[in-house]
Image: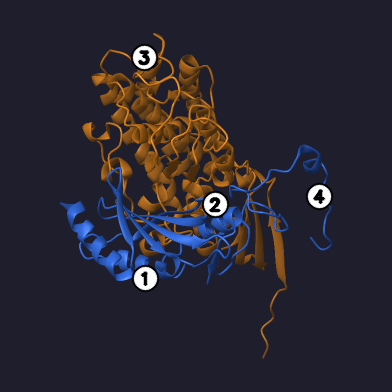
Chain colours: A orange, B blue
Amino acid sequence: MSIDKTQELVLNMGPQHPSMHGLFRMVVHLEGETVTHIDPKLGYLHRGMEKLAESRTYSQFIPYTDRLDYLASPHNNWAYVQAVEKLMGVEIPERAEYLRIIFGELARIASHQVCIASTALDMAGWSAWSYAFRDRERICDMYEMTAGSRLTVNIMRIGGMSAEPPEEFWPALQSFLDDTPEMLEEYYGIFFGNEIAMGRLKNVGILTKEMAENLSITGPVLRASGVDFDVRKAEPYSIYDRFDFKVPVRTGCDSYDRTIIRMDEIVESIKIIKQAVRDIPGGPIMAKVPKVIKPPVGEVYHRVENPKGELGFYIVSDGTTKPSRLRIRPATFINLQMLPIVAKGWKIQDVVAIFATLDAVLGEVDK
Amino acid sequence: MENKKLSRYVDELAARVNGVVEESLGVLVLKVQAPYIIEVLRGAKEFPFVPCDFLHDLCGVDCGDHFEVVYQLSSLHGPQLLRVKAIVDRENPVIDSATPVWGGANYLEREAYDMFGIKFKGHPNLKRIYMWDDFEGYPLRKDYVTEPIEVRNIVRTRIEGE
């Protein structure tokens, strides 16, 4: 007796598709509705950042880093300027460190809000999307007060910060922090309390601990697979060793845990910001750095905990004003490797869920 | 303490593969010739007490007369860091693929191939990742000449069946 098999269907998703979060394209091979093979096609947003860096001075490259992971641009600035500072041996003022922490953690909250919102949207939950984006606007307003722009903030410089937050920044930050418990309550109610959404996320797309370690996965995706690793704790950069916070870890390994772990991280980020606001000292926000940035011959690798994973910069300096080689280690580009492996055998709608919980930003994937 | 332990193991490994150990801003750097790379990576993965068992990053670097493939190794269970550099010949850039050791090397090696033309022997799917398939040249090589604007403006013709 022969078993009837449906003909294999090759479906092209993206680069223009509502659930592809930018310009991501994948060729999905289907048997009925079941995925047999996924072939991601990258490069639709490739701008050649690493090549561009070789013809620009160290300071000129800072605005380019904003365009990597554009949902958390302060983090990209931070990783880059810290790498150059490490190479040059520059100490930056205390106040600048605290301001960096505040902006970095605000960016983490904003990025996670977008992740939760877009996951909700991919699960067809329009209203949950609007709640998270409404709250993210307040963070964008705070960016705008300080730096003048709302998305590509470009707030850090080699040696400190570009601008001191204005007076109205601090009350706005305080009221945002006061409102967060209520905000999170709303997200829990409208999205994580929704049975349909949860039915599509729970036990979908299992990424085991061993797979995650083998595939070089980092960030919340790794921690949702039960690995307790965070660069902020393992190799504290900036002044993270002074703050009291926990690293949320979940052991479900599924899409649900990869989403809800971001809620836990928002709670921890709020704690860090509260401590930073309490302890922030006065003083200058820029160290004395030479007008022409000319690091000594050498190389440095610096990594930070970006909201989406570990962002690393590897800079090789030949002693001139331009880097000889600048390598960006994008977090989501490497995390994306799990998609073809994990999504195999799941239905086509589950692929959307798995991809959403990866929180890929194509600016960073394609560089 | 950790660093001392790691340093001892790295020295032992270097002696085995004729490598050179340097230190750069507190991170140990082990330089080896390309044919030894799999032995080095497997060795580093199995250091007792301080295993460098997580492939953090892999990238190519153009050093003028040769290429380097730089592996940033770390661990999820400790603070140890190790940078391994494999020296690859410029005329015939071939090196063994790290995919049997770490599945995560897959896209990273494709990127290094795309940008530098380094061929990774044993890679399951060594194709360009960012540039299109019939793109000529390797953009991050120092001798790559950026095409003039007139050439760039010519619309690429579609190959049949694409």
Q: Amino acid at mark 3?
A: Trp
Q: Position of residue B14 (x, y in %)?
A: 29, 64
- Whether residue B75 is visible, yes or no, is no
What is the chain identity of the residue bearing mark 2? A
Q: Position of residue A180 (x, y in %)?
A: 38, 27
Residue identified by numbered label 1: B39
- Mark 4 and mark 1 lie on one chain; the one further toward the N terminus is 1
Question: Mark 3 and mark 1: span between their CA atoms?
Answer: 55 Å
- Residues at badges 2 and 3 in contact (C-beta under 8 Å)? no
Q: Circle 1: is it few (<14), some (14-19), or many (20+) Cα within 10 Å?
A: few
Q: Nearer the viewer, mark 4 or mark 1?
A: 1
Same-chain check, marks 2 and 3 = yes
Q: Circle 4: is it few (<14), some (14-19), or many (20+) Cα within 10 Å?
A: few
- Mark 2 and mark 3 lie on one chain; the one further toward the N terminus is 3
Q: Is residue B3 left or right of residue A14?
A: left
- Residues at badges 4 and 3 in contact (C-beta under 8 Å)? no
Same-chain check, marks 4 and 1 = yes
What is the chain identity of the residue bearing mark 3? A
Q: Amino acid at mark 1?
A: Glu
Q: Amino acid at mark 4?
A: Arg
Residue placed farthest to the top in the image?
Answer: A167
Question: Mark 4 and mark 1: span between their CA atoms?
Answer: 44 Å
